[in-house]
Image: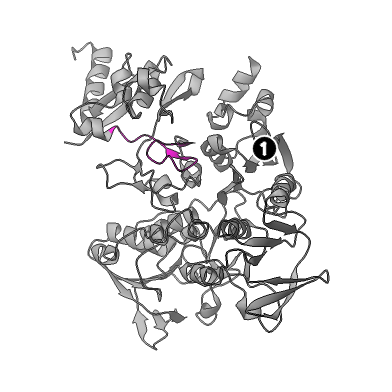
Amino acid sequence: MRYVVAGLHAAGRSACAWLRKADPTAEIIGVDPAGGPLYSRPLISYVLSGEMPLEGMTVAGEDYWSRLGVTLVRERAVSLDAGRARLVLDSGRELPYDRLLLACGARPRKAQTGGEKAGELCYFRGKADLARILERVRPGGAAAVLGGGLVGFKLTMGLIKRGMSVTLLVTSPHPLSLNVDERAGAWVGEKLANAPNVTLKTSVSVTRLDDAGNGRLRLALDDGETLDVDLAAAGKGVVPETGWLADSGLALRYGVVTDGFLRSSDERVFAAGDLAEAPDAVSGAPGVNAVWPVAVEQGRVAACNMAGVRTPYAGSMAMNAIPVFGTHMVSVGAVNPRLTVGCDFEEIGDPGGKYGYLKLVFREGRLIGAAGLGAAPRLGELAFAVKRGLGRKQVPDWWFRNPKNAAPLAAPYGFIPRLAAR
Amino acid sequence: MLKKTVIVRPERCVGCMQCMIRCAEAHSRTKSLASAIREDILAKPRIHISVGPELKPFPNKCRHCEPAPCQEACMPWAIRSDIAEGLKIVDPARCIGCGMCAMACPYYVIRYHRAPDAPERPAVAVKCDGCYERVEAGGVPACVEACKTGALTFEEVNLYIKQSERRLAGAVYGVKA
């Protein structure tokens, strides 16, 4: 049996490891143009902020792939002929396979900016992007960050620590508003506005990037202002890398459409990670949750199914946690305001308060998402409660006044009404 | 023979929390309760007495799953399985305290505290390490040593099942175990 894995990051690496466990004698070929030792992509923000040395991103030695018995092909896959079961590489070589895993991930969503220097806009996805940003960092200089999501926030904090003064340009009224909610976003916005070396501009977007001389960039904003900076970087989310699969014959929507076993429309081709459109554990609707744990889990499930070990995929769940001004911002499940229209909300505590702030999202009496600030000690219980769809009636009212005790979130069914009755 | 593991019998737990205290003590720098409570960074327990079914105490600790969801979720590969066989152990030097493992853990046994091994970090993941150093030295995990009711025992799992079968036989048929 010949397995080909296209893309060797979170999902692809996990899949290779599990393919080897499931089939010790199989031929496994890994296709990825990036060379060098295996590194963990999300750690680039820690390197940018100086919390971790560059080599700290390396998570396994050079011999990782040979120990796993994976043959590496350092080329880019440029097209797929699913009918003939051939993966075409950029050298023109055709790679036949028995089972193929598509794990090429996603690419940064391009900012809609014009201007002669639009190409100078940096993104923040992998090691190459990090190197590009570090090249342009000027301690004491000015930087602009486009996008008030998680990546934009990490970029801002990292560049401040590198000694730059940063202007964070957010299209929505608050930073992190899609990741948490308006209230927590407003708190983060206030903190950002009071932080040294940060200027927060909300409800604004960049229209042009032009040359300002001396290697600087001039940003034209849609409110008529201009901004001269040494570095402009954007964090506008990611889009699945599916352009090269357009002629493959596979069913594509936003990403590669997969079934409950992460199999694509071709029975020999599977998909995992940021390009796989798989069922969401909370809503049941197909979607892409582009986070690390989901990619690794999907890699495992896809590998088991590729090797003939029937493994249903339970569904992906969005989850994020980042340090924010001495506390933690967490989100689990459905919290995006666009996805929670018509839901009931419970807001507990205060973003700057003793117990932090927690927002619970209920749909038809079931917990479908939670987001908050400073909720780290009860993170596990919270995620578990979302995963199993905790009923609103199962949470006693006293808990909303003192959410520090996480037992009501974690306790088994049937327990809470009895406790509440006491 | 399989490796010995900590076996939890919640029906025997009385919620005395001695296991928590001894766990924290065993993970302190000085390994003595009297001095551990005066350390700069207080050692924290990795076993927790939570409320279980029937409102009874439930000693909750890491099950060292395989595959371990926490290990899959760990971005810097800080949860290692190469330190001690069969155990998933957090390497505080690599942990970035992001919180992903706690969200992935189906048993909610991962907490975040400052750690003596990584004092520069505000918080790192803290969870059961199976007291691998004590076990390698021929001892038993601290929580097991502390448990006076038999709710926590350190046994080889097949042997434990066999003993349970004998007990059941004794109870049902009056056979002497």
Tell whether A139 sits left or right of A99. right
* Region rendered in magenta: B111-131
> Could one spot residue B97 in this view of the protein?
yes
Residue B118 lies in the magenta stretch:
yes
Q: Is residue B175 above or below residue A385?
A: above
Q: Callout 1: residue from which chain?
A: A
In the rendered image, which quarter is residue B23 located in?
A: top left
Q: As rendered, which of A111 and A70 lies closer to the eye?
A: A111
Check the image and tell me how it is coloured: one colour
Decide whether the magenta segment is chiefly helix, strand or loop: loop
Q: Position of residue A109 (x, y in %)?
A: 62, 70
Q: Residue at x 28, y 57 (%)?
A: A21
Residue at figure coordinates x 16%, y 36% from the top left: B1
Q: Identity of the amino acid at label 1?
A: Tyr
Horizontal side, residue A321 vs residue A85: left or right: right
Residue A138 relative to residue A103: left or right: right
The quarter of the rendered structure image containing the C terminus of chain B is: top left
Foreground of the two, A186 or A320: A186
